[in-house]
Image (cartoon, grey):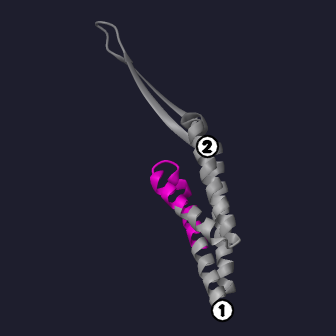
Amino acid sequence: MKILSRLSRVMAIIAIIWAIAAAVYLLAFATATTESVEMSGTPHQPPVTTRTVEQVLFVIYAGTTAVAAVILFSSLLIFGAVFAWKAALLPAGVISMLALVATYITGFTIGGFYFLGVIALCISTLLASVAARRRDSANL
């Protein structure tokens, strides 16, 4: 009984650490690479090709909507983990499912960074639910 509760808390801590690490990486270190090719020329001369490659910070490239999504996603994981830690099963379950759906929807952008954190949150919620059910059946 206590082992399930402890494992739930460990998974909640992992989810929180993952959410913070993903947010810090995306907001501080992630870059996007842009490439452009420009051709110019004059009559009777071979064309001149200019290739430009730039690396731009994710925050600048993606804009404020993506920054808000990163903050929202991290907050969702952190609040879900706190609810799982406290064994508040209804909010933890709702947030876990919401985070799972959001990860699926944003899977090819920022969702991939949060996938393992969401899995840890779902496992934490599941373990908290099983521990609460066992605790309730032991009290009968």
Q: Which residue is mark 2?
A: 68
In this view of the protein, can residue 115 be seen by the observer?
A: no
In the image, residue 128 sits, relative to residue 47, either above or below, namely below
In the figure, is residue 46 to the left or right of 126? left
Give the labeled residue for mark 1: 138
Q: Main secondary structure of the magenta part?
A: helix
The image quarter in which residue 13 lies: bottom right
Residue 42 on the magenta segment: no
Q: Residue at x 49, y 47 (%)?
A: 109
Query: Looking at the image, which residue is at 67% across and 80% down?
Result: 5
Question: Which amino acid type is marked by label 1?
Answer: Ala
**Position of residue 91 measured from the top left corner of the image (x, y, whole percent):** 62, 65
The span shown in magenta is 98-124
Identify which residue, 29 or 134, lies in the foreground.
134
Q: Amino acid at mark 2?
A: Ala
Disc marking residue 123: none
Q: Which residue is drawn at the image coordinates 62% and 56% (left, top)? A: 76
Is residue 51 something that shows in the picture?
yes
Query: Which type of secondary structure does the marked residue at label 2 adopt?
Result: helix
Q: Earlier in the sequence, mark 1 or mark 2?
A: 2
In the image shown, does 11 or 52 lie closer to the viewer?
A: 11
Q: Quadrant of the C terminus?
A: bottom right
Label 2 environment density (alpha carbons within 10 Å; few <14, some 14–19, many ≥20) = few
**The image quarter in which residue 124 lies:** bottom right
Q: Secondary structure at mark 1?
A: helix
